[in-house]
């Protein structure tokens, strides 16, 4: 169970870091911050990729429970992460403001849903595997 707790904490830290980097990127896109180095953008892309991989892992854990609620949460989480990633890439290619908003809002949804899913799965697996 220690491994599950460490994974939960690392997932939360990765999600939070990705959200903060995305928020900084969105503030640059809107003009609130004047400039941003390319390294921060690459760092954000790396963390977003890790977040996508972790959401796939959460999806597989949710499917193993056999319950409907975690499956629905995991599907929403995976859809929101995919939408955020697609919107982020489309913004980099087209430089349209709507993609920046879509990326930010999708990731906010994913952040909330994945936090709820992580807590649910942690409690589920802690109770089931005592």
Image (cartoon, rainbow, N blue to C red):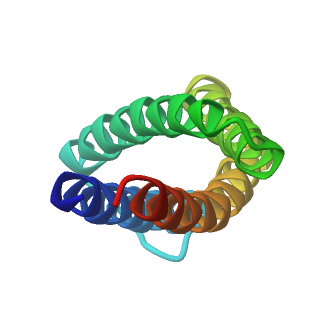
Q: Residue at x 54, y 28 (%)?
A: 60
Vertical relation: 52 (above or below) 43: above
Left or right placement of residue 121 versus residue 38 in this view? right
x and y percent of residue 102 in the render? Answer: 76, 49
Vertical relation: 5 (above or below) 93: below
Front residue of 92/129: it is 129
x and y percent of residue 100 in the render? Answer: 67, 49
x and y percent of residue 34 in the render? Answer: 41, 68
Quadrant in which the C terminus is drawn: bottom left
Front residue of 57/13: it is 57
x and y percent of residue 79 in the render? Answer: 73, 35
Query: Total label count?
Result: 0
Vertical relation: 82 (above or below) 99: above
Q: Residue at x 66, y 48 (%)?
A: 103
Front residue of 17/76: it is 76
Left or right placement of residue 4 versus residue 102 in this view? left
Q: Please identify the residue farthest to the top as the structure is shown.
A: 93
Q: Please identify the residue farthest to the front as the structure is shown.
A: 130
Q: Please identify the residue farthest to the bottom as the structure is shown.
A: 32
Left or right placement of residue 41 versus residue 114 in this view? left
Quadrant in which the N terminus is drawn: bottom left
Q: Residue at x 47, y 55 (%)?
A: 128
Q: Residue at x 41, y 41 (%)?
A: 48
């Amino acid at each position: 169970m220690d491994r599950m707790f460490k994974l939960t904490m690392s997932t939360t830290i990765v999600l939070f870091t990705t959200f903060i980097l995305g928020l900084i990127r969105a503030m640059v896109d809107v003009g609130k911050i004047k400039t941003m180095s390319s390294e921060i953008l690459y760092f954000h892309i790396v963390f977003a990729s890790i977040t996508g991989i972790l959401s796939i892992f959460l999806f597989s854990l949710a499917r193993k429970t056999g319950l409907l609620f975690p499956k629905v949460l995991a599907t929403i989480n995976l859809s929101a992460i995919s939408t955020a990633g697609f919107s982020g890439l489309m913004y980099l290619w087209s430089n349209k403001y709507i993609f920046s908003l879509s990326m930010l809002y999708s990731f906010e949804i994913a952040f909330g849903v994945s936090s709820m899913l992580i807590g649910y799965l942690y409690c589920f697996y802690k109770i089931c595997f005592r």
